[in-house]
Amino acid sequence: MFKSDEFRKARLATLIAFLINGFTIGNFVSRIPDFKTELGISNAVLGASLFCASIGVLSALRPASRSAAKYGSGPLTRYSAFTLSLALPLVGLLFNLPWFLFSLFIYGALSSIHDLSMNAHAAALENKAGKRVMSTFHAMWSIGGLSGGAIGGTLASVGVPIRAHVLAIAIFTFLVALTTRNWFLPASADMHSLGARKKYKMPRKFYVLGLFGLCGALGEGAASDWGGVLARESFGATPFVSALPYVFFSLTMVIGRFSGDFLAQRFGATKLLTWSGLVAGIGLTSGLMVGNIYGMIFGWLMFGIGLATVIPMVISATGSVANKDNAGQISAAQGVALVTGIAYFGFVIGPPLLGVLADLLTLRWAMLVPAALALAFGLSARKVLS
């Protein structure tokens, strides 16, 4: 049993962990158009390059889940925060295209380790609290993405060099990691022996949840990876305005996620997923049909509202199934790794798929893919989960 003060500090540390993870990614996303410009690459090459980051994410999930189970999610979250501070500077060096590909892989792997560990720690805290709190943690991630995107867009618009920008972010992240390093729950909170133990079959529900997460992840990736490029190249937006679609998308994600725990408790996960998919799909499609920067901002606003609670609900349900229905058999970290592995495959197939479609059909019409996937999981949620 943990003391209330210990629990509050661990909750605060986890909220901050989500914040700095999103903040790092928001700053990264804000400079994607500049990465493309400085390297002089096409949409297809940029999509293939971002694919390397996705491969890094997936390659790190399994070893990270085993480490979180063996050593506890608290210690892994603590130490991975320090390595996270190295991720963005590596990409920002931008020596040449091969370095860009390599650094994106490392960036993806380091971000993934921190992401997995903080989500597993959030599941442990949710289990101790005995109520839904996962959506609030993810709201903090969205606040990080929102602030990171806004700051990064501002710095890009005034001509701050990429190297100076990423170095400042690295120093900030390191100082935050140093401050919160002793606030997490001890390893005993969710350590799970991986010794000579019988192998258990993963529940089928994990795979269903993973597929819903995949649709959500591909949509989030489309907003982050291509929102700025779409605004700048299709509608002639300035560097600052190019950052606004992702900023507004992140803003609505924040609002939706702060409401997510209440809405899930009030209406149930099935209804919430159904309406989430419909709002996201119809909203983004409408913005694309309008065909100007104002329509796109509206589209990303609605898309953010719709997708806000998808990933948090998926991870929360995974932790609940592991901790309550499979206690002592499957750790929450292992369940989260499987489900996020499926979900994050959306980040793997999204960048190259949308990049190729952009060169074939224009980026504007390629964005109908994430809109259609949102409609698909919205229309199928009731049938699959009821």
Image (spheres, rainbow, N blue to C red):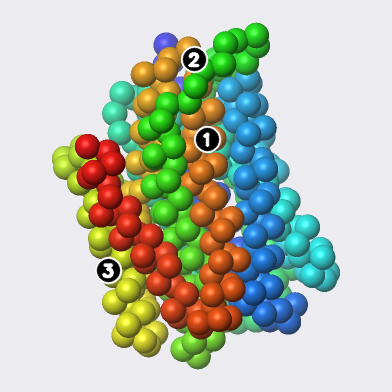
Residue to which mark 3 is pinned: 282
**Quarter of image, res 46:** bottom right
Classify 335 as above or below 383: above
Label 3 SS: helix
Q: Nearer the viewer, residue 282 or 191?
A: 282
Kind of residue sitting beneath label 2: Gln
The image position of residue 1, as x and y in percent, is 42, 11
Residue to which mark 1 is pinned: 338
Kind of residue sitting beneath label 3: Ile
How packed is label 1: few (under 14 Cα within 10 Å), some, or many (20 or more)? many
Confirm whether residue 215 shows in the render: yes
Q: Residue at x 39, y 40 (%)?
A: 209
77 displayed left or right of 14: right
270 displayed left or right of 66: left
Q: Nearer the viewer, residue 123 or 129?
A: 123
How packed is label 3: few (under 14 Cα within 10 Å), some, or many (20 or more)? some
Classify 288 as above or below 4: below
The image position of residue 317, as x and y in percent, is 36, 33
Kind of residue sitting beneath label 1: Leu
Mark 1 and mark 3 lie on one chain; the one further toward the N terminus is: 3
Mark 2 and mark 3 lie on one chain; the one further toward the N terminus is: 3
The image position of residue 320, as x and y in percent, is 37, 26
Classify 2 as above or below 81: above
The image position of residue 312, as x and y in percent, is 38, 43
Label 1 SS: helix
Q: Residue at x 46, y 54 (%)?
A: 217
Q: Residue at x 42, y 54 (%)?
A: 215
Q: CA distance from mark 2 to mark 3?
A: 41 Å
Q: Are marks 2 and 3 in contact (CB under 8 Å)?
A: no
Q: CA distance from mark 1 to mark 3?
A: 30 Å
> Can you tell which mark lies on residue 164?
none
> Can you tell which mark lies on residue 329?
2
